[in-house]
Amino acid sequence: MSIGKKIALGAAWMMLMKFSIRLIGLVSTLILVRLLDPADFGIAAMAMTVVTAVQLLTMFGFDVAIIQNQNADKDDYNTAWTLNVALGLGAGLLLIALAYPAAGFYGRPELVAVYMALSLATIFQGLENIGLVDFRKHLHFDREFQFRVAVKVAAFIVTMLLAFTLRSYWALIIGTITARLAATVMSYVVHDFRPRWSLAAAGRIMTFSKWLFLNNIMHTLRTILPDLIVGRIAGARKLGLYTVSYEISNLPTSELIAPINRALLPGFSKVADDQAAAGRTFLGVAGLLALLSLPMGLGIAVTAEHLTPVVLGEKWLDAAPVIEILALFGSIMAMQSPITMVIIALGRPRVVSLMSLAQLVFMLPIMVMLTRAHGVTGAASAMLIMSSLSLPTYYVIVGRILGIRFLEFVSAACRPLLASLLMFLAVRELTAHVDVSLTGLLLLVAAGGFVYTVAVLALWLACGRPEQSAERRVLASAQAVLGRLRRSRTPEPPAM
């Protein structure tokens, strides 16, 4: 099987995994928003923001270093595990030390106990079996699917039981700790690698991982800064609105980003020396992401006023404009995020680190200014502005590395973009004539899907049915699936 097909199969498994995990998460969220108050989500977000900030010290990406190095041996695995254990323990102790100052920053003394409890999650995370990296390194994504979904189910059960019992943010906190403990225990059940204490490969691992560390810090700071700023300026309730809006608005596009990224890294690492093959593979991925993520993001944005009361309930109505803005942000990030994985896989993490630093420096003052002026909608607008300006820059960089011309990028994305805009205008016109109800929301979704499908197919036909296009690949995959279904339903001829 070719690398391109292995990446596609791996991405399919990862998309199935993310869909399953997100489906469980969505069910969990829809239940929790009716059991808990926005302030409970805000307190949990305040807690997780500080935890994530502390975990910056552990984000060296040792697993990525092992995947990128096709000749990694047991010394690399043992060293990575030893370093992870040490960093996890250090992060847990640091979180305990910061419990009182962090609670004082938010003016929420109840957070002290929360930080103490969550220190366990960071320690558990450091103890996870490094052997799991083999699932991605050798493209065995079906096994990672089984592992991650089982962990999510365990956390879901615990969180739901506690939510019905406690009716407080502690259900979210204990659910997080349970997920980390379950992942650590099960990592030694599903993989037979048994790590040992060693620092034999520390030098060569750190040579690569130091840039991943900087990149991970920049990426994480971009993620948690809105929570820190909104929580500090607007308070727990507004932060709860922001975090839930982010999750709902980015739900479809995030299902594309993470699984494709996890498949791209090992796949591109295997073709890093073949620029032409890497370029063709990336253009295929870029076209597929445009085809799927753009209509999802614009669809959520245009239906936000209907989606919010139907899905979240009346007490979340203030989230509608935030969801609308963040859905557009999610589409852009779906297009940008795989570029960083490609650059890392090609052995240039320094480029990604410097770009991430530039994004952070640019975003911080705009985020503070807009949040003070417009609250959570200002924070969402800052994220949209930052992503809109950074996407073209990322495409220029990866184009130079892979020898891809600008018109090739335009060709991969222009039809999905035009079709998505047509869908947006059609659905926006229809929203004025549809009631705010589940039936109305489903009608808008069906109309949007129909308009987009017809528009993108019409544009593809008008362009002469290009062979190397995402539309062609999707149609071929659909025909293959239908063919297998027809063959499975055809009865076997009787034996003579």
Image (cartoon, grey):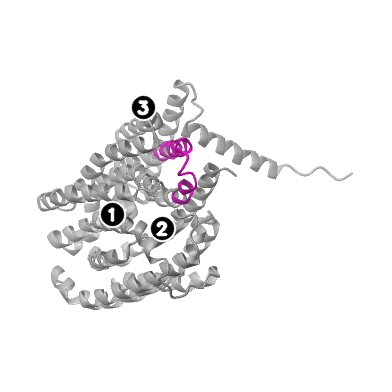
Residue of label 3 = 407
**In front of the other: 157 or 294:** 294
In the image, residue 127 sits, relative to residue 477, either above or below, namely below
| Residue 4, x across and y down, in percent | 52, 42
**In front of the other: 85 or 350:** 350
Decide: few, some or many residues near mark 2? Use Cα within 10 Å; few <14, some 14-19, many ≥20.
many
Question: Is 268 contained in the magenta span?
Answer: yes
Asked whether residue 110 appears in the rendered view, the answer is no
Chain-order first, disc 1 or disc 3: 1
Q: Residue at x 13, y 50 (%)?
A: 365
Question: Is 275 contained in the magenta span?
Answer: yes
Residues shaded magenta: 265-290
Asked whether residue 121 appears in the rendered view, the answer is yes
**How far is the residue under mark 1 from the one under mark 2?**
17 Å
Q: Find out whether the residues at labels 1 and 2 contact each other: C-beta distance under 8 Å.
A: no
Tell me the kind of residue under disc 1. His
Could you say whether the residue bearing mark 1 is in a helix, strand or loop?
helix
Which quadrant would the C terminus be assigned to in this image?
top right
Chain-order first, disc 1 or disc 2: 2
On screen, residue 416 versus residue 465, left or right, reads left
Residue of label 1 = 219
Q: Residue at x 56, y 38 (%)?
A: 478
Chain-order first, disc 2 or disc 3: 2
Residue of label 2 = 65
Could you say whether the residue bearing mark 3 is in a helix, strand or loop?
helix
On screen, residue 487 versus residue 339, left or right, reads right
Farthest-out residue, right: 496
